[in-house]
Image (spheres, rainbow, N blue to C red):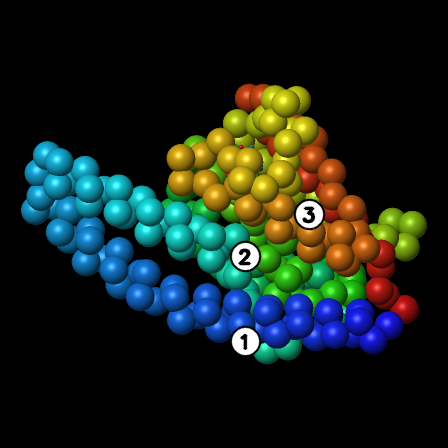
Amino acid sequence: FNNELQRSEKMAIISELAASVAHEVRNPLQVTRGFLQVLTKKYRNQDKLYMTMALEELDRAAGIITDFLTFAKPQFERISVLNVKEELGHVEGVIVPLANLQGAQIDMRVPDHLQVKGNSSKFKQAFINMVKNSIEALNGDGQINVWAYEMDERVVIHIQDNGEGMSKEELARLGEPYFSNKTKGTGLGLMVTFRIVEAMGGSLEFKSEKGVGTEAVVSFPSAAV
Ligand code: ADP
Ligand code: MG
């Protein structure tokens, strides 16, 4: 018991440290990106190639922070009863500008009363990683539907897109660290999502068909009284 307590305390310290690092690192990355982008226009040939590669590496670093720490706050991890509509509303606020930029539509239908138990930052992180994948799978315009309900004392949340979909082989590898089919992917997003869902006592399943779309079904024990 003692050891376990120590371990969770260590985890809490690491989480807090990671959150502060994410906050501190994001800004200089963004500033550097801006300068590099200006410079890229002035260079030619080999130099231009180096600048472009530097930009891509910066984006990769930013992607790692996004997949782990979009909502991280420098505070010790708090477990509480979360209102699903409210939490997903925050996710929507972050993701809608990104969706609109690419011509994607997001329709979110979540009733008021759904409640689950967990950490707010982690919960939101799990969903942003899935919705972001949906946006990226659309390759431009397309539709993403998010809906939720309670069934058999579980809160069930669906995220569906009409994007490029996946083959059986790709589907089987979801959640594997560093598995990515994207040039700028980290392959860490779904690993993070699976871990968070499992830690909350939930389950996550994906259905997908190549060329048709993908649907993620997440379910958690309901915390409604
Ligand atoms: P990344 O997004 O950095 O590639 P992820 O762990 O988030 O890493 O996703 C892993 C891979 O799973 C993606 O590269 C993509 O091929 C596939 N994938 C995940 N979600 C979807 C989706 N909604 N539609 C199509 N493919 C998806
Ligand atoms: Mg991803």
Crowd around label 2: few <14 · some 14–19 · many ≥20 (10 Å): many
Give the amino acid type for the residue marked by disc 1 in the picture: Pro
Given contact means CB atoms under 8 Å apart, are the residues at marks 2 and 1 in contact?
A: no
Q: Secondary structure at mark 3?
A: helix
Q: Going 12% across and 45% down the picture, which residue do you hit?
A: 41
Decide if residue 33 is in sight here. yes
> In terms of depth relative to the viewer, which is nearer, 74 or 47?
47
- The x, y position of residue 108, in whole percent, is 62, 50
For mark 1, give the secondary structure: loop
Which residue corresponds to mark 2? 68
Marks 3 and 1, how far apart at CA = 23 Å
- Residue of label 3: 194
Which of the two residues, 2 or 62, is positioned nearer the viewer here? 2
Report if the beta carbon of the residue with label 2 is closer than 8 angstroms to ligand 2. no
Residue 9's x, y, as percent?
70, 75
Q: Position of residue 189 (x, y in %)?
A: 56, 47
